[in-house]
Image (tube, rainbow, N blue to C red):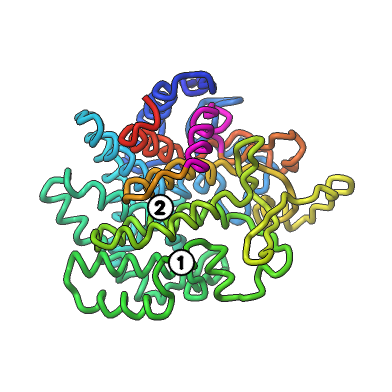
Amino acid sequence: MKTHDIQGMYSGLPLFRKIQLIQAFIEDCHFCDNGIAYSMLYDGTYGDIGIWKREYFEGQSVGPYDACGWMNNENSTFFSGMYLQSQVYRYQVTGDSQALEECRRGFNSIRKISDLAGKERFGWLSKPFGMQCSNTSSPDQNLNAINGMLAFLPYASAEEVNWIHQIIPAIARCWHKMNYTIEFDGRRWDMRSDIGHMKIFYAFNEVAHKITDGIEFQNEANQLLKKYDDINENSASLFDTHAQRYPDYFSDWRLVTEFAGATALFASQTVQILAHVHNDRASKYLAGLQRAIQHSLIGFNKDYYAHYYMTEVKNFCGKYIWRPLNLEWRCNPVIADHIKKSTCALSEYPHRIYWFDATSRIPLIYLMYLNLGGCRLPYIEQIVLEIMGRLDFARLHWMVDRDGDQFIPELTYMHYTLTSEMPNYIAAYWLGKKFSLWD
């Protein structure tokens, strides 16, 4: 049976050793022979650690997806970009040529995913389920890929720079041509109704304009800015942008799932692109990032140091307050047939499952904020140190049922799913070295 040293990672290990284990695991297990990165891997509890096999999903609720293709590749684009970014930070601190080689593994994975779409769809970075081009993607997948490539530019070869300067404008143009709307799995997702997502597309057009000096990108950026506004201290998180569009959205308790985790990602990575374009303007975004950092802790349980996947949020006198879901459903659980068969049940019933993707982003967004010139924030710094200190193999999972009774039987496989966001910890570690957060 295939195992890996990472399975023995415990919280008491020195932080540098934990990062070494994560780095080694990614190098050993996260890339297919074709060069494309995997995303959420199997933890090896009852078989080989690594890619998923079909037998693991018998009787499980995985929705309309091919289970193996979904778990192995949903976040391959996201992972590739974040891994590339993490290795750039590693190289900047260490000068290690191995880090530069790993940069190219992340970068080449993005290129391979781009190749799946063919020349006619150049600029379409999909979620490559089963190592094939799909009609599914999301702004955050592209956001991470672009940030990774921008970070890599100073160390890229002339040919690599040329490709980056082609793909980024192509990404912006591709989404514009589709009217920021995609259709997949019988769904139509029109992102023009989501202010947070459209701020991301504004950043894409800004950087595309910087690369090409093309008027089409300048015009589109100006239109998006006029309609959706820039990131600022009043509009930095998904909580803010939803409240802007729907003023009564949080007037009473509202169940939300990924708002806090997405807030952490969208704001910091979008600002990083805008700061690349307008480095003289980086400081103007710091107040917005401080607000995003505050809102990224909504749903964060300070006892366990992790985020609930589901929380209820309410705006009380201008401040967002939250509470975990009640658990009355456990007394008489009624899980409809369609939940088990036609959609992933994770979002279909109330629970207190922990979502470590969101938690993994907290150290990184704080350190990205410092890297942009932000002042030290003791309250979040203490949380960052504690998150990194508690890091162990259990916390490298996607979802965790701490109580042991939150997953329904149809979600058993989630006990064994590793997060696709391990590179967040690597990136945070090397940025943290720059600011002397740890030895």
Between 422 and 334, the residue placed more toward the observer is 422
Image coordinates for residue 113, horizontal then vertical, percent: 34, 52
Image coordinates for residue 183, horizontal then vertical, percent: 50, 69
> Looking at the image, is 50 positioned above or below residue 83?
above
Mark 2 highlights which residue?
A: 132
Mark 2 and mark 1: Cα distance apart in space: 25 Å
Range shown magenta: 378-397
What kind of residue is marked 1? His
Q: Is residue 13 left or right of residue 428?
A: right
Between 159 and 58, the residue placed more toward the observer is 159
Farthest right residue in view: 332
Between 280 and 199, the residue placed more toward the observer is 280
Which numbered marker is on residue 293? Answer: none
| Callout 2–callout 1 Cβ contact below 8 Å | no
Query: Mark 2 or mark 1: which comes first in sequence?
Result: 2
Image coordinates for residue 23, horizontal then vertical, percent: 37, 29
What kind of residue is marked 2? Gln
> Looking at the image, is 340 positioned above or below residue 389?
below
Secondary element at tag 2: loop
Q: Report the residue at 45% width, 61% height from top.
A: 138
The question of residue 383 being in magenta is answered with yes
Q: Report the residue at 70% width, 43% height from top.
A: 59
Q: Report the residue at 64% width, 37% height from top.
A: 400
- Label 2: how many residues lie within 10 Å, few (<14), some (14-19) or many (20+)? some
- Work out whether residue 285 can be spotted: yes
- Work out whether residue 31 can be spotted: no
The question of residue 150 being in magenta is answered with no
Which numbered marker is on residue 197? Answer: 1
Principal secondary structure, stretch drawn in magenta: helix
Q: Is residue 182 left or right of residue 300?
A: left
Displayed quadrant of residue 135: bottom left
Q: Is residue 322 left or right of residue 289?
A: right
